[in-house]
């Protein structure tokens, strides 16, 4: 697994589409990034805007290297848009960076009824091809509801006491993951997990 961990809620309808055609993995990941990039550019000061655009021009030079991946992503985005999918089918993508390791270890060291909560950090069903640090993973909405409920009942103090890292390090990771699962569960969404 990779250095960074990303979590994002996904609507049941979009998740069904993804499971039916795993070639759409990169398009689903891009669906949220494109809107976030537009919002970032719109909110930027003139100096920030120039720095962002300069970075994008440098990325354009790499397009030829990654042409096949870019074409597949564009193909998938076209399909998703034609079928009516938008960013409303996803929650904000959160990144707990490398804190996922400490959180997973702390959750896995908990006593019996809580131990399976480690799967909220690293579990799920694999789908699609290897993205560099393994394939995308997902949980169904019913799994997300169950995990969100269990995470909400779990005491932060109990988890932090099990972690090898600093208290704030594990607590912040737990609270971030807890909020992400709670939001997805409240909307009846599934969950995507990706390591990069």
Image (tube, rainbow, N blue to C red):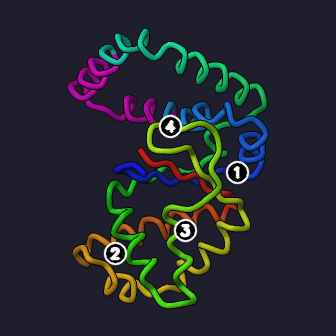
Sequence-earlier tag: 3 or 4: 3
Q: Is residue 194 above or below residue 48?
A: below
Q: Which residues are magenta?
A: 35-56
Magenta segment, principal secondary structure?
Answer: helix
- Of the image marks 2 and 1, the number of the one nearer the N terminus: 1
Q: Cα distance, mark 2 to mark 3?
A: 17 Å
CA distance for labels 2 and 4 = 28 Å
Q: Residue at x 58, y 80 (%)?
A: 150
- Do tag 2 and tag 3 residues touch (Cβ < 8 Å)? no
State yes or no: discs 3 and 4 in contact (Cβ < 8 Å).
no
Mark 1: few, some, or many residues within 10 Å (few <14, many ≥20)?
many
Q: Residue at the spot x=50%, y=48% of the render? A: 194
Q: Residue at x 50, y 45 (%)?
A: 134
Q: Position of residue 128 (x, y in %)?
A: 63, 39
Q: CA distance from mark 3 to mark 4?
A: 20 Å
Give the residue at mark 4: 131
Mark linked to residue 171: 2
Nearer to us of marks 4 and 1 is 4
């Amino acid at each position: 697994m990779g250095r960074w961990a990303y979590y994002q809620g996904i609507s049941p309808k979009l998740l069904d589409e993804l499971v039916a055609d795993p070639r759409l993995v990169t398009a689903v990941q891009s669906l949220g990034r494109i809107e976030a990039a537009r919002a970032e550019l719109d909110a930027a000061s003139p100096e920030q805007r120039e720095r962002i655009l300069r970075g994008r021009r440098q990325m354009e030079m790499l397009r030829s290297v990654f042409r096949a991946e870019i074409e597949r992503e564009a193909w998938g985005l076209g399909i998703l848009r034609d079928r009516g999918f938008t960013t409303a089918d996803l929650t904000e993508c959160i990144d707990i960076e490398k804190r996922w390791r400490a959180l997973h270890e702390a959750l896995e060291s908990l006593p019996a009824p809580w131990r399976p909560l480690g799967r909220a950090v690293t579990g799920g069903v694999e789908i699609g091809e290897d993205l560099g640090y393994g394939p995308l993973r997902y949980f169904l909405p019913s799994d997300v509801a169950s995990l969100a409920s269990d995470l909400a009942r779990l005491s932060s103090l109990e988890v932090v006491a099990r972690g090898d890292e600093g208290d704030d390090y594990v607590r912040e990771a737990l609270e971030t993951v807890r909020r992400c699962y709670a939001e997805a569960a409240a909307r009846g969404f599934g969950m995507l997990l990706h390591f990069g």
